[in-house]
Amino acid sequence: MIGPMSKGFTHARLACGCRITFREGVEGSPVTVVVDEKSPACTMPLHVRNLPLFDYREALRPSTRVGPPGEEEFEEEG
């Protein structure tokens, strides 16, 4: 995966006006996104200066677990 830091990005501005920075991540995540400067106009309570942002939308990510074997098609008798 090519992250924002490998492309030369060090910071970005979100639509709410907050400024974020990219830092080296920890195990399992190559990049950590941190709120560098909270915008006075931002209404997002999760945007806190110097704290990382996390993606909690697990349902939108592909599953990392092995699913049950698929059911074979069957024909009705009679």
Image (cartoon, rainbow, N blue to C red):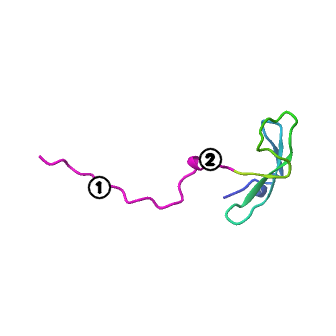
Residue for badge 1: 72
Q: Position of residue 24 (x, y in %)?
A: 78, 61
Side (left or right) of 56 relative to 12: left
Q: Position of residue 53 (x, y in %)?
A: 75, 50
**Range shown magenta:** 55-78
Q: Answer whether residue 66 is magenta in the image.
A: yes
Residue at image point 65% right, 49% down: 56
Q: Tell which circle, 2 or 1, labels the residue nearer the N-terminal end.
A: 2
Q: Answer whether residue 38 is magenta in the image.
A: no
Q: Quadrant of the N terminus?
A: bottom right
Residue at image point 29% right, 55% down: 72
Q: How dense is the environment of label 2, judged by Cα within 10 Å: few (below 14), some, or many (20 and up)?
A: few
* Residue type highlighted by circle 2: Arg
Q: Nearer the viewer, mark 2 or mark 1?
A: 2
**Viewer-nearest residue: 65 or 5:** 65
**Viewer-nearest residue: 30 or 34:** 34
What number is the disc on residue 3? Answer: none
Residue at image point 79% right, 40% down: 14
**Viewer-nearest residue: 50 or 8:** 50
Residue at image point 72% right, 56% down: 3
Side (left or right) of 77 relative to 54: left
Q: Find numbered disc 1 in the image and state the secondary structure of the residue it sits on.
A: loop
Q: Position of residue 52 (x, y in %)?
A: 78, 53
Q: How dense is the environment of label 1, judged by Cα within 10 Å: few (below 14), some, or many (20 and up)?
A: few
* Residue type highlighted by circle 1: Glu
Is 24 drawn above or below residue 33 in the view shown?
A: below
Q: Residue furthest front?
A: 45
Q: Find numbered disc 2 in the image and state the secondary structure of the residue it sits on.
A: loop
Residue for badge 2: 57
Count of numbered circles on the image? 2
Q: Residue furthest left?
A: 78
**Magenta stretch secondary structure, dominant:** loop
